[in-house]
Amino acid sequence: MNPRRKKRLLGVVAIIVGIGAAIGLVLYALQENINLFYTPSELIEGKGSNKEKPHIGQKLRIGGMVVPGSVIRDETSLQVSFTLIDTGPLVTIKYQGILPDLFREGQGIVAQGVLIEPDVIEAFEVLAKHDEEYMPAEVAEAVKGIKHEKPKYNLESGN
Amino acid sequence: MIPEFGYFSLTLAMVLSVLLCIFPLWGAHTGNLRLMRAAPSLAVGQFVFVLVSFAALIYASLTDDFTVAYVAYHSSSTLPWYYKITSTWGGHEGAILLWLVMQAGWTAVVALRSNSLPWILRARVLGVLGFLGVGFMLYTLWMSNPFELLLPYFPVEGRDLNPLLQDPGMIIHPPLLYMGYVGLSVSFAFAIAALLTGKLDNTWAKWSRPWTMTAWGFLTLGITIGSWWAYSELGWGGWWFWDPVENASLMPWLVATALLHSLSVTEKRGVFKSWTVLLAIAAFSLSLLGTFIVRSGIIVSVHAFATDPDRGLFILAFLAIVVGGALTLYAFRVSQVHSEGRYKLVSREVALWLNNIFLVVATFIVLLGTLLPMVHKEMGLGSISIGEPFFNKMFAIILVPFAILMGIGPLLRWKQNKWSFLQNKLLIAALMSLVITAAWLYSSYAVVAPLTLLATTLAIWIVITTGVDLYVKATVQTNFSQGLKRLGLSYWAMVLGHVGIAFVIAGVTLTSAYSVERDVSMKPGEIVQLNQYQYRFEGVYTIRGANYSGYAGEVSVLKNDKLVTVLHAEKRHYDIGMQFMTEAAIDAGFTRDLYLALGEQLNNSGWSLRIYHKPFVRWMWIGGVLISLAGFMILGDKRYRTSKKSTDKSQEKLV
């Protein structure tokens, strides 16, 4: 091989190795940071056709309705716990901190956290990003089986 | 009457934009100068009618005309007048109308400021912009009419503007962002026109550059204000969430940044031509993709309000036509493009090429993280989300070589350099930045993590190397102060942009590393210590605003027993939407922000409060503003002024 070709070959090999390493790194980081979304019944009964259940210690997202009357606050600290429901089983969420403005009993929320018992999640984030009329899309889909529901405006009655 | 007039005006604008699309493009194809000459007046006419239409919507909102569905859903009679105006872009239909105003506005400005261009290119640029205008207007008139009426049963009161959007940041954030998004359509139009004409040369890059820079400046400012709005309004003290909608604005920004660096190479050296064109197409395509993501309803986000799958489908189809068409044209024409310049490994060309590589890789990472959850969901594999750590880790990895390169790049000359010429300067700069950073951080903080030290050193490194370069460039022929005056504005733009990035890096690093957050429950009179500050909770009183009522918690902040400030964090309850909103109290400072949010009342008569100490958080917005100034500065550069002298008779000829 003449020196010029050798140089080119080295260049090409370097580029391929570089791209490979980059893709590997991205996929590795991605794998660590993908959080699956569950509903309470999927969490208890398993998700998908294989009925896969999450393992203890897994990071996940859960969405459901806050069961009215289930919110228990600690007297002295900011520890709060509540249960979520979709169609049957209940899942308890524990959270330390201030709940978002739109958090209310009977409404849909999404929480991110770690599964600490088969039906208990220690949340590090509670989201309630939705307006009066509709739930987070993920929850609406899971609970009602409807996709992309448009919010309904009840102007005459509401105000 | 006025709303119907607005709709009618928009229809007229649509007719003009159809003509603007057909006449000049056909004229350029057949060599008919008369058809081409119609383009500027059509562009201006289109803008006037869109503007009238937008004014009609503002009028309807200001006069509480609740027969208009949009006004009824997004405004109310108790809303202050300035929010009545901003409510016209607080919802989907109005936001798209604002988009149209921007699109037509850019088209009109291009029409008026492009008289130094040969007619054939000018006509094609305006024709392509007209085509884009047709797409968006068709969408507005067909699927998202802001003038839809609620007759005969219209409400007596509106539903009010989403409280989150009742904020000064919201007044300016969307218009700036749209200016940026839509401005990139001008670079796109220039690229397509150049491909159609088959003349991709330095002159093309020279024409395209000021437009791209300006659009990029607006985009930068829009993103910066958006981040600041999220920080001050969402009550979480966060400034970037890697939310799909934020990512949608970041992707075009990254590609546009690559584009304007690549354009400078094409302009000065005549290389990277086909790559530059591809970037121009990609930047605008990503703006459109962003619109699709935001408006189609396939994502869950703070920003995704009323959404509709039909609308998503329309935008997707439009995206496919624009991107598909552009890439097809590119594929056919790119083989005719030849780069003539030669350069060696150690040269500014290579540095800028690497800059582009890093920026494109960063874009791909954001794209992957944004689209993967959507693809996953649409394939029926269930919902997933990709956590912030993924993006943070990836960006941290890219940042290191990128920032090092940012220091070296400007010092390099075109074509080739002797490495020995740079070696000493770079070594000294590296040592200096390390020493300064170490002295700064170790004197202020007890613990300094290696990554914090590294990232801050990189920020200082960028500043120092930029300073060295400034000195070298200024003292080439004369003494320093004389030389400074002779440097061009586009050079100063680079200095400002790079220093801005240094500010962003330092701000993000230090605020991430040293922010302290605490959720506490406090009774009146209690004191909490956070860093050097004591927070004394004074109690809660009730407040009453124009369209809300609520409570405000008063907290005195003390440092060494001296009063620093009194913060009033509010919890508002908006009358109409029945929504609660946390209005955080922020004591802003150059080196630190004190941030306080009021939670809820607890059973034991105490209140929950969230207190943050955020050092240097403002630096990233200062950086963002500096970077956007860099974008606007190029407008003052003499080289890019369209001078009447150079046009003289040549515009009569078909070049």
Image (spheres, coloured by chain):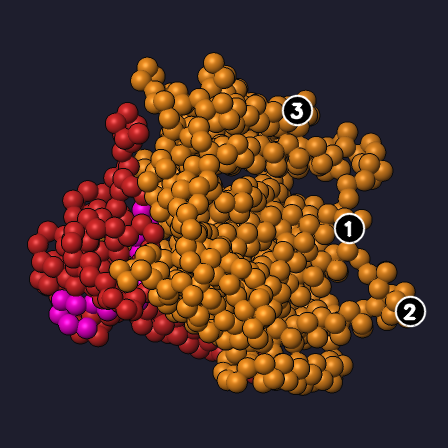
Q: Nearer the viewer, residue B608 or B81?
A: B608
What hue represents chain A?
red
Q: Chain of mark 1?
A: B
Q: Is residue B594 above or below residue B176?
A: below
Q: Which residue is mark 3?
A: B41
Is tag 1's residue or tag 2's residue first in the polypeptide sequence?
Answer: 2
Q: Colour of chain B?
A: orange
Vertical order, B588 against A2 (above or below)? above
Q: Nearer the viewer, residue B121 or A61?
A: A61
Residue B354 visible in the shown view: no
Residue segment shown in magenta: A116-130
- Please give left or right for residue B63 compared with residue A116 in the image: right
Badges 1 and 2: C-beta atoms under 8 Å apart? Answer: no
Cβ atoms at labels 2 and 3 below 8 Å apart: no
Q: Which badge, 2 or 3, comes first in the chain's sequence?
A: 3
Residue type (three-letter) at the residue carrying disc 1:
Asp
Task: Determine whether the residue tagged by mark 1 lies in a helix, strand or loop.
Answer: loop
Judging from the image, what secondary structure is the residue with disc 3 in?
Answer: helix
Q: Amino acid at mark 2?
A: Thr
Q: Position of residue B240 (x, y in %)?
A: 46, 60
Q: CA distance from mark 1 to mark 2?
A: 22 Å
Q: Earlier in the sequence, mark 3 or mark 1?
A: 3
Residue linked to disc 2: B478
Chain of the residue that carries numbered disc 3 in the rendered image: B
Distance in Å between CA atoms under marks 3 and 1: 27 Å
Residue at 36% from the left image edge and 32% from the top image edge: B159
Q: Are marks 2 and 3 on the same chain?
A: yes
Name the residue that disc number 1 marks: B637
